[in-house]
Amino acid sequence: MIPLRDANPTRRQPLVTPALIAACFAVFAVELWVVTTGGDQALENLAKAWGLVPASLVAAVKAGEWLSQPVLAVFTSMFLHGGWAHILGNMLFLWIFGGRVEDRMGRVRFLLFYLVGGVAAGLGQTLENPTSTDPMIGASGAISAVLGAYLVLYPRARIQSLVFLGFFYQLIAVPAAILLGYWFVLQVIDGLASLGGTDLTGGVAVYAHIAGFVAGALLALPLRLRRSVG
């Protein structure tokens, strides 16, 4: 299932969501410039410098270096991407699901929520493998938090999705509970498969996805409960 569109209207035009998308594409343009002028090695150095490296983060925290580059990379890593497929896939999900969550939370709270979700995702991946020296980049952890919040706030909303049935496909309005629940189960399965020591996740930070999703759902729960009480 590939989500394409949330047809449900918002009360206010989202501003933070498109701004985050624009920021990610602006940083990606810088990445393209870096690889054009310096080659793949320059891009790799950029990712290592500003991507989240679990081993470096753990060392910085233990040393109390809270404003060091490894700590700041928890935030900067959210805006770096590893290629066109990576950024287009992430931005599609953010565009589809971010607007309504922003509408419900308000712009300032949504921005804070997005950043906190990204931090939670990065910490989740770090806890899974604190000695890793591979940089983690991408907005998918923060976007996973958005997905978790969307599921809590709008479980009955229907998302126009491309559903593949063997060699055929069909456009179907899929309930968010099914679409996002299915996505989360896949992340958990991939995460459990990677526990055996063999990298079966294809370089995807599934624990960041899981941690971000859970954090987003928990952070959105008070808003859902407040509406239920009201």
Image (tube, rainbow, N blue to C red):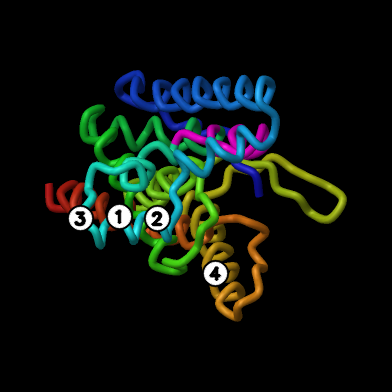
Percent x, y of residue 1: 66, 49
Q: Secondary structure at mark 3?
A: loop
Residue hosting label 2: 56
Give the CA separation, mark 4 to mark 1. 26 Å
Q: Secondary structure at mark 2?
A: helix
Label 2 near label 3: C-beta < 8 Å? Answer: no
Give the CA separation, mark 3 to mark 4. 30 Å
Local crowd at mark 1 within 10 Å, few (<14), some, or many (≥20)?
some
Q: Is residue 43 visible?
A: yes
Give the CA separation, mark 3 to mark 2. 12 Å
Name the amino acid type tagged 1: Ala
Percent x, y of residue 189: 58, 71
Give the CA separation, mark 1 to mark 2. 6 Å
Label 2 near label 1: C-beta < 8 Å? Answer: yes
- The residue located at (62%, 33%) in the rendering is 42
Residue hosting label 4: 191
Give the CA separation, mark 4 to mark 2. 23 Å
State which mark lies toward you, 3 or 4: 3
Residue hosting label 1: 60
The answer to whether residue 162 is above or below residue 28 is below
State which mark lies toward you, 4 or 2: 2
- The residue located at (61%, 34%) in the rendering is 43
Region in magenta:
79-91
Percent x, y of residue 215: 32, 56
Local crowd at mark 3 within 10 Å, few (<14), some, or many (≥20)?
few
Principal secondary structure, stretch drawn in magenta: helix
Name the amino acid type tagged 2: Ser
Residue hosting label 3: 64
